[in-house]
Image: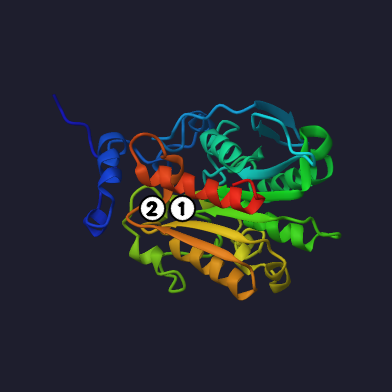
Amino acid sequence: MAQSKIHQPIHPDIAGKLLDEYATFHNTHLAHAVPVHELPWDPAIRNTPAVLGGSVPLKVGAVKDLPLSKCSVRVFTPEGQAPAGGWPVFIFYHGGGWTLGTINAENAFSTNMCTRGGCVVVSVDYRLGPEEPYPAAVEDAVEALRWVYSKGKEAIGIDPTRIAVGGSSSGANLAAVVTHKAALSEPPIPLVFQLLVVPVVDNTASTTDSRYPSWQENANTVALVPEKMLWFRDNYLPNKEDWTKWDNSPIFAPEEAFKKSPPAWIGVAELDILRDEGIAYGEKLKTAGVPVEIQVYKGAPHPIMAMDGEALEVGKRLVSDAGAALAKAFGTA
């Protein structure tokens, strides 16, 4: 019996650095799969999980989908009685390179934040490239924030003075953009916290970029290789002149917006090409006077947040850390 071809081998550059638990999972479940960026594009790809190895969503009090003007949101409400002023609320933007994902994406993380954070979670099913490139996702991200702030108390029982935002990867990019949009709004929309997991914050970054050594250091990583990241970027940002706009690359947002940003928790993976831009973003927030916690997950590549099932302890730890940070920010710990 012929052995199937290995399309995603673990490169010697990182073999000695990669967590054993991840290497085992990768060799068993991922190595023989053709990477998505090497396949002919088909929107049906979104119907399968972008990342394998996730946990099962937790039971929460209620789950309902609601329409916005051009996208929808999924609302997760905790079990039990709401606080007198309404639930705190976490607006979440899923990952997938602005290309992959559906309203079902990363629901396990949403339910974990709902349960661990004692809050309503509003997961945004924003429009995706290449069919709907920039600025569609930004428009949907901002609309979701404005809807929660202006209509959320009546519609979903939340406290509009206790709003946090967050996301994973491209979703963390949107969350970071939203914090600046909120700060610069007239009047400003108050946010209490931002939770950014393996964020994309600079869409001008590349393997020749000395600002972020992780792009070169981790060029032969697993999962999010440079070619895949650039494929995502091209799907979402086909016009290169858009790459430097701060609502694509929030590290370029005005200083005024950084100074008005809410406290942040930023989780990055040691073997991720995006590691150093996430750290740089956190340092820029700190320079602006914002309280920031930066957590680096050693020996881990990019997708561990969504790999919190039985196989990866590091994925479970990241989800637990994120939940604890959110609960602390809301005072629900």
State the image quarter where residue 239 is shown.
Answer: bottom right
Q: Is residue 209 left or right of residue 58?
A: left
Q: Position of residue 30 (x, y in %)?
A: 32, 38
- Residue name at image x 73 percent, y 43 percent: 144
- Residue name at image x 35 percent, y 52 percent: 300
How many numbered circles are shown? 2
Q: How does the figure colour the protein chain or chains?
A: rainbow
Q: Give the residue type that dot 2 points to.
A: Val
State the image quarter where residue 312 is shown.
Answer: top left
Q: Which residue is mark 1?
A: 229
Q: Is residue 202 left or right of residue 165?
A: left
- Residue name at image x 41 percent, y 44 percent: 315
State the image quarter where residue 143 is shown.
Answer: top right
Q: Position of residue 324 (x, y in %)?
A: 53, 49
Identify the secondary structure beneath mark 2: loop
Q: Position of residue 301 (x, y in %)?
A: 37, 52
Q: Give the residue type that dot 1 points to.
A: Met
Specify whether residue 236 is in view.
Answer: no
Q: Are marks 2 and 1 in contact (CB under 8 Å)?
A: yes
Hey, which residue is sitting farthest top in the picture? 1
* Above or below, comparing residue 132 to residue 81 in the picture: below
Identify the secondary structure beneath mark 1: helix
> On the rendered image, what quadrant is the N terminus found in?
top left
Q: Which mark is residue 147?
A: none
Specify whether residue 83 is in view.
Answer: yes
Q: Which residue is mark 2?
A: 225
* Cα–Cα gap, marks 2 and 1: 6 Å
- Residue name at image x 69 percent, y 73 percent: 255
